[in-house]
Image (cartoon, grey):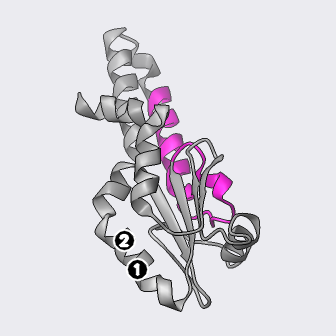
Amino acid sequence: MLGRLITWAVCLTNLNFLSIRVARLPLAAMIIYSMVSNQLLANDVILSDVKQLRWDNRIILALADRQSEAEVMSQLYLAKSEIDERDLLWFMINAEQLMSNYEGKISKDFARDIHEKYLTNAVISVLIGKDGSVKDRQTVFSLNSMFLLIDSMPMRQTEMMRDKD
């Protein structure tokens, strides 16, 4: 996100120079500073709902017992580059704790809330798209099937085409 802001800032600054609007440069600098400051402050925001991640990330929610925890974590760690490539954040809940690749602060009620809202009955994993809607519910955790589903989505197809350029 910060990278997008910096790219936008460079474009805005170049636009100002091209149109010889040097007088507006301080205004552009103030706008850019405000946007970057807000982004940095957003990192201090405590994650309390997956809706806060909408349009920036796809989300995997997983529930693991003591027997399946090692397998789920192994799949997630071994696929780090594939997960990063697909803008995925994962949250794995077990009896004692919440584990995640999310780098910010997480609300103490987050695990309970996603468990109650998404991981009900026999569902042990859920895929949520960037648009915030549930794309898949699984009774057996399968990262590969989630990757296949994600890669078939129009938004992901567009991302892959853009990344080729």
Q: Say which element carries label 1.
A: helix
10 vs 99, nearest the viewer: 99
Q: Which residue is mark 2?
A: 75
Label the magenta part by its dominant secondary structure.
helix
Whether residue 61 sits left or right of residue 10 in the image: it is: right
Which residues are drawn in magenta? 27-56
Q: Which residue is mark 1?
A: 71
Q: How many marks?
A: 2
Mark 1, Cα crowd under 10 Å, few <14 / some 14-19 / many 20+, is few
Residue 24 shows in this picture: yes
The residue that appears at 37% across and 57% down in the rendered structure is 83
Return the x and y of residue 127 as percentages of the image width and height. Answer: 56, 55
Whether residue 67 sits left or right of residue 9 in the image: it is: right
Whether residue 103 sits left or right of residue 115 in the image: it is: left
Report the quarter where the C terminus lies.
top left
Give the alpha-carbon distance from disc 2 to disc 1, as whole Å.
Answer: 6 Å
The residue that appears at 48% across and 66% down in the rendered structure is 102
User: Is 66 above or below relative to 116?
Assistant: below
The dot on residue 119 is: none
Return the x and y of residue 106 as percentages of the image width and height. Answer: 60, 72
91 vs 29, nearest the viewer: 91
User: What kind of residue is marked 1?
Assistant: Glu
Report the quarter where the N terminus lies.
top left
Return the x and y of residue 80 as percentages of the image width and height. Answer: 32, 64
Return the x and y of residue 22 as percentages of the image width and height. Answer: 38, 17
